[in-house]
Amino acid sequence: MTQLTQLLAELQERFGADADAAIGEQALENVRVAYLGRNGEVTKIRRTIGTLPAAERPGAGKAINDAVAAMEERLKAAQAAVESRAVDAELAASIDVTFPAIAPAAGSIHPVRRIIEESCDYFMRHGFAVVVGPEAEPDYYNFDALNIPSDHPSRESFDSFWLTDSVLLRPHTSPMQIRTMQEHRPPIAIVAPGKCFRRDALDARHLFQFHQVEGLLVADDIHFGHLKGMLTGLCRELFGSGQRVRFRPSYFPFTEPSAEVDTTCPKCRGESAEGRCSLCGGSGWIELGGAGMVHPNVLREVGYDPDVYSGWAFGFGVERLGLARYRVDDIRRFISSEPDFLAQLS
Ligand code: PHE
């Protein structure tokens, strides 16, 4: 009897393994016939019942029937598995693997970011360090230390967003000149990119939130020629050699002498009749920003002796550089959230 139980257990196990291994309906049917068919394994065992003592026969018959019932259950599960595999195969056959794939949307670096990176790269190659600072500044860093006393009319030219009576969203990156000079002794060579804010009405050349790249070099014997050379080099790097650059005398309280730096209007190339070009207003140039030799009062404020040290500084609008670099005719397109347009600018 125990011998029979063991035999049946082994048989069920083999049957299970064969049923699982069967690929396709025909293979499974072959397994069924081999075990449960008329001349299958089970029948062979059934035939041995007659050799048992009469008292054991009913028990043996029941054990065999139980085993058959379990094997039939198992067979059903295997049939279901074979069927679902058949459906998968059908599905796989219906997929055209040569069909062009859907390209993943890769995105692109924003042109403003790219110009900041390329500008910093240019200056780093010349030994400058990149520094960043706060976007909200006490008026001391933004005005007083930059030689703009509280009653000075040029405060008005920075039409600013004030957060409190004495803290404002910085309208330029020049406070970074003061912060850097207060922390370090000359020689100083830094670029400071970052966001700036002004209460300007939006138009083709103005945003109320924009970016500047500030630069500062202070050492012995620095003169205006160094400034012109570095800024002309920057424009060449960003725009190629075709783009013209001019330095126009100007005024900033924190530089003396001061200049505004312009480049050829990317839209009309300086060829529009007076007043016609919507980007440059017909002047043929667009302003990139300001520059000049650091004012002695600024050097004094941070404890440098202006008789020993001299330096230059500049602050360029990054979006303005973008207009020239990409020949875009409206600065607002940089904040337009048009990924297809922005991706074209590289
Ligand atoms: N901070 C000035 C501006 O935003 C630009 C500037 C920077 C001018 C450094 C001179 C020197 O208008």
Image: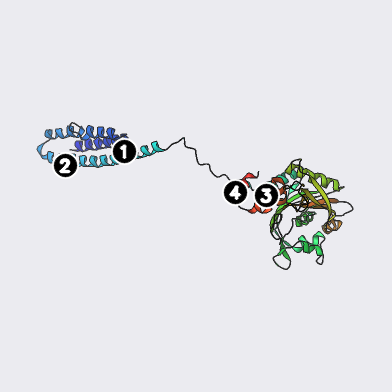
Between marks 3 and 1, how big is the CA–CA gap? Answer: 59 Å
Looking at mark 4, is its residue's CB closer than 8 Å to ligand 1?
Answer: no
Secondary element under disc 2, as helix, strand or loop, is: helix
Q: Which numbered circle lies on residue 62?
A: 2
Sequence-earlier tag: 4 or 2: 2
Disc 2 packing (10 Å; few <14; some 14–19; many ≥20): few
Amino acid type of the residue tagged 4 in the rendering: Pro
Whether residue 239 is visible: yes
Instruction: Tell me if 103 is positioned left or right of 261 in this view.
Output: left
Between marks 2 and 3, how big is the CA–CA gap? Answer: 84 Å
Between marks 4 and 2, how big is the CA–CA gap? Answer: 76 Å
Whether residue 222 is visible: no
Residue 20: x percent and y percent? 31, 37
Image-quarter location of ligand 1: bottom right
Residue at the outermost bottom position? 165
Query: In this figure, which residue is indicated by the disc labeled 1?
Result: 82
Instruction: Tell me if 104 is positioned left or right of 29 in this view.
Output: right
Sequence-earlier tag: 1 or 4: 1
Amino acid type of the residue tagged 1 in the rendering: Val
Query: In this figure, which residue is indicated by the disc labeled 3?
Result: 112
Amino acid type of the residue tagged 3 in the rendering: Val
Secondary element under disc 3, as helix, strand or loop, is: helix
Residue 256: x percent and y percent? 86, 55
Give the vertical position of 186 relative to 77 (above or below): below
Give the vertical position of 46 relative to 339 (above or below): above
Q: Which numbered circle lies on residue 291?
A: none
Secondary element under disc 1, as helix, strand or loop, is: helix
Residue 167: x percent and y percent? 72, 64
Residue at the outermost left position? 54
Q: Residue at x 64, y 53 (%)?
A: 335
Sequence-earlier tag: 3 or 4: 3
